[in-house]
Image (cartoon, grey):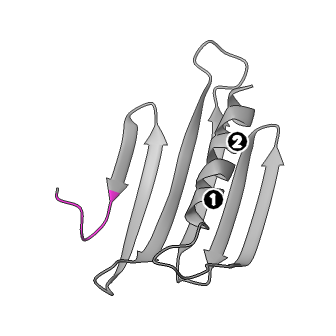
Amino acid sequence: MKLMLVFVVCTFIAVCSAAPQSGKDVETIEYESDVGPDGYKFSYKLSDGTIRTEEGVLKNVGTENESISVTGSVTWVGPDGVTYTMTFVSDENGFQPEGAHIPK
């Protein structure tokens, strides 16, 4: 059930990311998705330069400590014309983003 919820949330984010920005229509150039019993992965590329990849893996399956570990990255072109990239891990230690534009 947790995996399905994560998949639905990720799909919602992907759809929202594909919404037109600044009056320009944004199209999906590439999209891949694979959902299995022990995890999922997806990636997409949009015509505005946005690229996103993500992979979630179940850990400690069948135990009371079952959890999901998610890793991924997103690249986009900001309003200032600069290309930004953020990588992230989300697991039992919380959401941990990294990027040159993110203060440490």
The stretch in magenta equals 98-103
Is disc 2 in contact with disc 1, using a CB cutoff of under 8 Å? no
Q: In the displayed structure, does residue 89 sit left or right of residue 15?
A: left
Q: Residue at x 28, y 83 (%)?
A: 80
Q: Residue at x 36, y 75 (%)?
A: 84
Numbered circle sitting on residue 56: none
Numbered circle sitting on residue 14: 1
| Residue 99 spot, x, y in % from top left | 31, 66
Q: Label 2 amino acid?
A: Val
Residue at numbered disc 2: 8
From the viewer's perspective, is residue 40 above or below residue 42? above
Magenta span includes 1: no
Q: Residues within 10 Å of mark 1 (few under 14, many from 20)?
A: some
Q: In the displayed structure, does residue 95 sit left or right of residue 16?
A: left
| Residue 5 spot, x, y in % from top left | 68, 33
Q: Label 1 amino acid?
A: Ala
